[in-house]
Image (cartoon, helix red, strand yellow):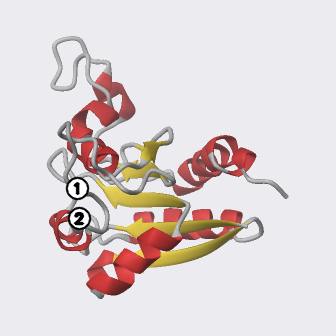
């Protein structure tokens, strides 16, 4: 049975109290549980570094669920990476920079929520012209790849503050998980 760790990086803020990201975590957990063991971390609830390191070492796949704040991860999720990703445990020195990751048997998936509408990524002469959500989150991808993890296709839900469309995004998320994660698990 596969082992999945879901890390919810949502923070409680006035404009976005984290309910949408928590609902996406719940959808993933419910869908995965019949075929996988699932562990959860909610960064806002605090964590023990050694316990988190053990969870990551235990997992086959890590799902990072988080809202995008200022084109990056919430500050508490960045702090999580800084504290949990330890030299000598997740990565070490290598002949070539960036090739010393020890987590080569693990995969990761980013599931992000955006205040921006999806069409903002296609506006001509717009802020995101010729950019994708994954381009904007390159530092997160580099971080995971630096420790050796392999990337699975990312998921993004858009315009979740002005038009949350919770059921629509939950259905899209389920389809994404079925296609990119559950299809790889044996019964």
- Residue in the foreground of this view, choosing between 172 and 15: 172
Q: Quadrant of the C terminus?
A: bottom right
- Report the residue marked by disc 2: 81
Q: Give the total of numbered labels.
A: 2
10 Å neighbourhood of mark 1: few (<14), some, or many (≥20)? many
- Check whether the beta carbons of the residues at disc 2 and disc 1 lie within 8 A of each other: yes
At which x and y percent is residue 9? Answer: 32, 67
Q: Name the residue at 18% across, 62% down.
A: 78
- Provide residue 65's location: percent of width, then percent of height: 41, 60
Instruction: Specify which label sits upstream in the sequence, 2 or 1.
Output: 1
User: Badge 1 is on which residue?
Assistant: 73
From this view, report whether residue 33 is shown above or below residue 102: below
SS class of the residue under badge 1?
loop
The image quadrant where one finds the N terminus is: bottom right
Image coords of residue 14 (percent x, y): 20, 71
**Res 76 visible:** yes
In the depicted view, which residue is nearer to us: 78 or 51? 51
In which image quadrant can residue 88 be found? bottom left
Q: Identify which residue is drawn at 62% across, 42% down.
A: 180
Residue name at image x 25 percent, y 49 percent: 143
Query: For the view shown, which residue lies furthest in the right direction?
Result: 187
Query: On the rendered structure, is 151 left or right of 35?
Result: left
Residue 145 against residue 37 in the figure, above or below: above
């Amino acid at each position: 049975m596969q082992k999945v760790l879901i890390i919810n990086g949502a923070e409680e803020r006035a404009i976005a109290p984290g309910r949408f990201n928590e609902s996406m975590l719940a959808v993933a957990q419910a869908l995965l549980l019949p075929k996988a063991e699932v562990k959860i971390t909610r960064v806002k609830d605090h964590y023990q570094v050694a316990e988190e390191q053990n969870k990551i070492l235990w997992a086959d796949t890590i799902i990072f669920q988080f809202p995008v704040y200022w084109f990056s991860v919430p500050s508490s999720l960045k702090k999580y990476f800084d504290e949990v990703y330890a030299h000598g445990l997740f990565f070490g020195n290598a002949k070539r920079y960036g090739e010393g990751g020890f987590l080569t048997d693990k995969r990761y998936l980013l599931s992000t929520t955006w205040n921006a509408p999806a069409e903002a990524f296609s506006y001509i002469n717009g802020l995101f012209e010729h950019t994708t959500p994954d381009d904007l989150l390159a530092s997160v991808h580099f971080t995971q790849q630096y420790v050796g993890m392999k990337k699975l296709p990312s998921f993004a839900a858009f315009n979740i503050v002005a038009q949350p469309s919770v059921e629509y995004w939950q259905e899209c998320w389920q389809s994404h998980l079925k296609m990119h994660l559950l299809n790889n698990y044996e019964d």
